[in-house]
Amino acid sequence: MWSASAEYDYEDDGYVLKIEDDATFDQGNARLTAGLAKPHLKFGRDGYAATMAFLDESSVARSDCLTAAGSRQIDGRASSLMFRIMRWQSVQLDVEKRKENFDAVIAAVRKVLRISDQVAEAGNSPNLSTLKLILRQWGLANLKDMNEDHPNLLGADEAEKVSVELGQVQLDLKILEEVSKRLAAKTGNKNGTDQLLTAFLMVTAQMLVIVALGLALLSGFLAWVFGTANNDERVEMGWFRYTVGWLVGVGVSFVLLGMCPTEIVSPTVQTWFLNGLIWVGFALPLVGLLYFVRTHFQLPWAQLALLTAIMALPIVVNFHLSATVDLGIAVIAQLHPVVMIASLFAFAWVCWKSVRLIAAFARNNVLSQRRKLLACGILFLFALITVPAGTALAAIMSDELEVQAWISPRV
């Protein structure tokens, strides 16, 4: 009701609460007051079991029930609700503090402390124990700060009690944090092994037979259609090649259909690998064209690489002049003076070698002037296509290829 009837913005002096519907906002406050009068705040511990029971009666595939139940985030909703209440009370606290209405400030803090008191261990998820301490730490810290800034807001005994309890709550939070770290370190390998075993069983039990049967049928059909005559010499593959092929097939299936969906291979690695495949697919035709130019015009690799760079230079300058200049300035600015001097000598040496290679190409008597111009024209067209296409591909991959698991568990 607070979200439906009001909103808050952060300005220079702090939060500003803008109430659009006073009746609805007051109704929300009344409901909170009624809730604070209850002895306990319980969200239940059987949410996932109840969800699974519901899914058993639904049309959802049994293999997808666990994913569907986990997507409900039952524990997260309880935490989100209490954090939102604390957030709204924090805003009202800030507003009332600037008005120097300290009674309202103390009342807002005590509401949050009352909620933390209501969260009992029975009937709630164990994860809420940490949240209970967080709420209590927030409330006690605000009471302590308010009393320090404005003495006599709390009695001496209550102020001492707040200080002691705050220290204990902070200690309990540190203990829970350390316990969580140690449990994660202790069970990390076990969980990884379980995931590995699950992935392996899923691949071998569900997919291997289907894939093998399909390949066998396809291979039999191809052998029947394109089989050799009886008088042709047959090549025996041998058991070793069959074994290697089978192991490679199982390994690829295991990685693609097991380790990727379960994110044993992290989404980051999957995205890097996909990027690599795309760039390899982009580069292979280009390398093939360069190889064709080399063999057809009988050019050494060094001359071919230099001619390609020279032909691509005006295209790069046309498309990426500012970016190239900025990159060069940034690199030079970060270089150590000694490294800069060494780089200048290296650049001079490269220029000298380039001049010698160009001179050797110009003096090449094997190629006629016409074939030399033809080679340069082909390389220029090669650069004219490659540079814009590579730029567009990089932009598309940067915008569209987000880090994610690229093979769904539904496979």
Image (cartoon, grey):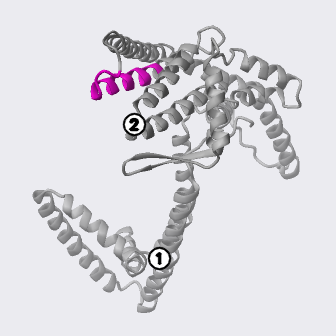
- On residue 88, the disc is none
Secondary structure under tag 1 reads helix
Q: CA distance from mark 1 to mark 2?
A: 67 Å
Does residue 227 sit above or below 137 in this rendering?
A: below
Q: Amino acid at mark 2?
A: Lys
Q: Nearer the viewer, residue 147 or 350?
A: 147
The location of residue 64, given as percent across then percent down, is: 77, 30
Q: Nearer the viewer, residue 382 or 33?
A: 33
Q: State the residue position of label 1.
A: 383
Quarter the C terminus occupies? top right
Please state which of the two labelled residues, at mark 1 or mark 2, is closer to the viewer.
2
Residue 142 magenta-highlighted: yes
The location of residue 273, given as percent across then percent down, is: 54, 46
Q: Which residues are magenta?
A: 136-153
Q: State the residue position of label 2.
A: 97
Q: Bin the neighbour count of mark 2 within 10 Å (Cα to Cα): few under 14, some 14-19, many 20 and up.
A: some
Residue drawn at the location 63% of the way across and 44% of the way down: 22
Secondary structure under tag 2 reads helix
Q: Amino acid at mark 1?
A: Ala
The location of residue 197, given as percent across then percent down, is: 64, 20
Q: Can residue 248 be seen in this snapshot?
A: no
The location of residue 325, given as percent across then percent down, is: 30, 72
Does residue 150 sit above or below 321 in this rendering?
A: above
Q: Can residue 197 be seen in this snapshot?
A: yes
